[in-house]
Image (cartoon, rainbow, N blue to C red):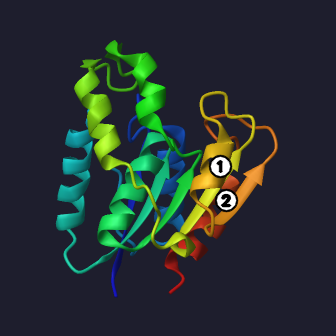
Amino acid sequence: MEKVVIYLHGFLSSPQSQKAQQTLAFVKAHYPQLPIEIPKLANYPQAAIEGIERVVQSHPGKTCLFIGSSLGGFLATYMLQKYGGKAVIVNPAVRPFELLADYLGAHINPYTRESFTLEAAHIHQLIQLDVQQVSHPQNIWVLLQTGDEILDYRQAVDKYQGAKMTVEEGGDHSFQHFERFLPDIFRFLLQD
């Protein structure tokens, strides 16, 4: 079956982020026939999901392979639960509705310069998107660094039990030296 890779960036990020661009360059160099999509996600959760759904629907009949970073990992978990496929999630936000409750108010995306206001309704949208029980953890590889200054990596260790898991000491929320993992990430995603 044909496949498509969909890279989902995090909160206050964009398709121009370092990991997104490293992933794109790797696919172009090593898997030039493999379609890859790196959508610019909306700043609000429900609108972000609707945008991802449009990308999925533009590839009918293809198996979706998700790579998600931070909030993108949370969204990838939701999409995987709904559409199947496989996912690699990097320092995923496990409980973003708790984390982002401290971020209510006005923001400017540092990549896109878009200004937006995060409201309580958006936190509620995140709660609605939360996957309580991951149904096929064997289709997920979780990459974590213990030095993540934004998220507690242990939340992901607890949530994604049964998934392939790599926990590296140190590092940070950006997942330092992510590009080292790209060959293995694509072996995992493309393996039937």
Q: Are marks 1 and 2 in contact (CB under 8 Å)?
A: yes
SS under mark 1: helix
Q: Is residue 62 left or right of residue 70?
A: left
Residue topped by disc 2: 181
The residue sitting at 41% across, 18% down in the picture is 103
**Residue type, numbered disc 1:** Phe
Q: Is residue 54 left or right of residue 115?
A: left
SS under mark 2: helix
The residue sitting at 72% across, 58% down in the picture is 166
Picture quadrant of residue 174: top right
Crowding near the residue tagged with mark 2, few <14, some 14–19, many ≥20 C-alpha atoms within 10 Å:
few
- The picture places residue 172, in percent across and down from the top left corner, at 69, 34
In the figure, 134 relative to 102: above or below? Answer: below
Regarding residue 36, the answer to whether it shows in the image is no
**Viewer-nearest residue: 70 or 190:** 70
**Residue type, numbered disc 2:** Phe
Picture quadrant of residue 12: top left
Q: Is residue 100 left or right of residue 48?
A: right
**Viewer-nearest residue: 20 or 99:** 99
In the figure, 50 relative to 67: above or below? Answer: above
- The picture places residue 34, in percent across and down from the top left corner, at 39, 73
Crowding near the residue tagged with mark 1, few <14, some 14–19, many ≥20 C-alpha atoms within 10 Å:
some
Tell me the distance, in whole angstroms, between the alpha carbons under discs 1 and 2: 6 Å
- The picture places residue 51, in percent across and down from the top left corner, at 21, 48
Residue at far front of view: 132
The residue sitting at 32% across, 25% down in the picture is 112
Residue topped by disc 1: 178
